[in-house]
């Protein structure tokens, strides 16, 4: 299946980069449908939050696997464009039948993170992080050494 290859490819690339303890979870792919036991220092979630009808429950589930205060969730979801009121449902990202049911702005991501005492950061309009304390491995994302 297509998702399996993507998930498997990411695991291989991360292991090749020197990370030994890497696992994959995708509840829709039988080979990866067993929820892993945490905690994890880094959790990635690509193109998932916009498909969640209950993003708070999704974040609670992901956060339950994150290591203490030094972990990070790296995720992607495209933020609403500034002209959303003008383009409305014509925006390609919320086109009919693409499965995107939760759409975000930067303030919406902050609102989502607040009950979990998580901070937010964005590298661009599509790539974001949730964290409590910036872990050493993520300092470069914020221009820190």
Image (cartoon, rainbow, N blue to C red):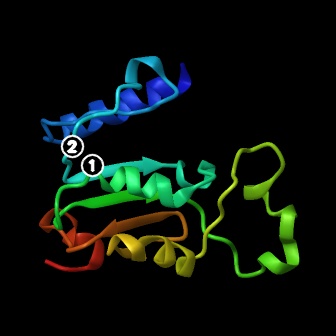
> 23 and 8: which one is in front?
23
The image quadrant where one finds the N terminus is top right
Q: How far apart are marks 2 and 1 (CA)?
A: 5 Å
Badge 2 crowding class, 10 Å Cα cut-off, few under 14, some 14 to 19, many 20 or more, is few
Which residue shows up at 48% across the image and 55% down it?
A: 57
Horizontal and vertical percent for residue 21? 15, 36
Q: Tell whether 60 sits left or right of 52.
A: left
Please say whether residue 123 is visible from this viewpoint. Answer: no
Quadrant, the C terminus = bottom left
Residue 4, image x and y in percent?
A: 46, 24
Q: Quadrant of residue 92?
A: bottom right
The answer to which of marks 2 and 1 sits earlier in the sequence is 2
Q: Is residue 139 left or right of residue 119?
A: left
Q: Position of residue 80 (x, y in %)?
A: 67, 71
The secondary element bearing badge 1 is classed as: loop
User: CB of mark 2 within 8 Å of CB of mark 1?
Assistant: yes
| Number of marks | 2
Q: What element carries label 2?
A: loop
Q: Is residue 112 above or below residue 16?
A: below
Residue at mark 2 = 38
Is residue 16 left or right of 118 when viewed as pictured?
Answer: left
Q: Which residue is drawn at 47% across and 30% down?
A: 27
Quarter assignment of residue 86:
bottom right
Q: Give x and y (percent) for residue 17.
A: 19, 42
Above or below, 74 against 61 in this view is: below
Quadrant in which residue 140 is drawn: bottom left
Residue 32: mark in rendering = none
Q: In this view, does 110 lie to the left or right of 21?
A: right
Q: Which residue carries the number 1 mark? A: 65
Q: Dot 1, how many residues are within 10 Å of its Cα: few (below 14), some (14-19), or many (20+)?
A: some
21 lies above or below 79:
above
């Amino acid at each position: 299946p297509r998702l399996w290859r993507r998930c498997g490819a990411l695991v291989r690339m991360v292991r090749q980069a020197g990370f030994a303890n890497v696992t994959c979870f995708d509840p829709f792919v039988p080979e990866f449908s067993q929820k892993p036991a945490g905690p994890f220092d880094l959790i990635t979630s690509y193109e998932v939050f916009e498909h969640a009808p209950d993003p708070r429950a999704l974040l609670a589930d992901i956060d339950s696997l994150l290591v203490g205060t030094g972990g990070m969730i790296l995720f992607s979801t495209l933020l609403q464009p500034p002209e959303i009121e003008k383009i409305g449902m014509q925006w390609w990202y919320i086109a009919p039948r693409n499965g995107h049911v939760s759409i975000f702005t930067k303030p919406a991501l902050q609102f989502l993170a607040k009950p979990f005492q998580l901070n937010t950061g964005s590298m661009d309009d599509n790539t974001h992080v949730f964290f409590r304390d910036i872990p050493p491995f993520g300092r470069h994302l914020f221009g820190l050494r």
